[in-house]
Amino acid sequence: MANTNAAAQHRGVPLFAHLGNGNLLPLPEIQIIGGGAHANWRTDVQDFMIIANGARTYEESLEMTFAVYHATGDLLQEQGRRCGIADEGGYWPEFATNEEAFEVII
């Protein structure tokens, strides 16, 4: 951080201007399926998360992740696996293996 601040000062520009031209979009990581200790060890993996790569706006990234989150919930409900919501907001399904969680998300 000190190096970046020093470089911005050396160039005579504000830190945000030194870091980029303002078109970089931070994309949220959304938990879809909770696991590990927070989900009673239903999976070994702590969190199954998605990022909306390719979203052009923050709003679009939220729309994309919202759609995936709810589609996953519907799929888990259809399969009889939807057991609740984990402490971080992801679903808390019953899986025999970690691979089953990846298959549902994909």
Image (cartoon, grey):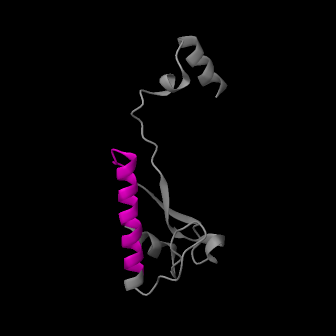
Point 36% across, 57% down: residue: 63
Q: Residue 81 location, x and y as percent?
A: 46, 84
Position of 1 with respect to 96 (left or right) is right
Q: Is residue 18 magenta?
A: no
> At which x and y percent is residue 100?
45, 76
Tell me how many marks there are: 0
When the figure is inspected, residue 68 is found, relative to residue 16, above or below; the finding is below
Q: Which residues are magenta?
A: 53-76
Which quadrant is the N terminus positioned in?
top right
Residue drawn where x is 66% and y is 71% of the image: 37
Q: Is residue 51 above or below residue 7?
A: below
Q: Position of residue 33 (x, y in %)?
A: 50, 70
Displayed quadrant of residue 69: bottom left
Viewer-proximal residue, 46 or 77?
77
| Front-most of residues 46 and 23 | 23
State yes or no: residue 71 in magenta.
Answer: yes
Residue, x 37% and y 65% (percent of image)?
68
**Direction bottom: furthest residue:** 80
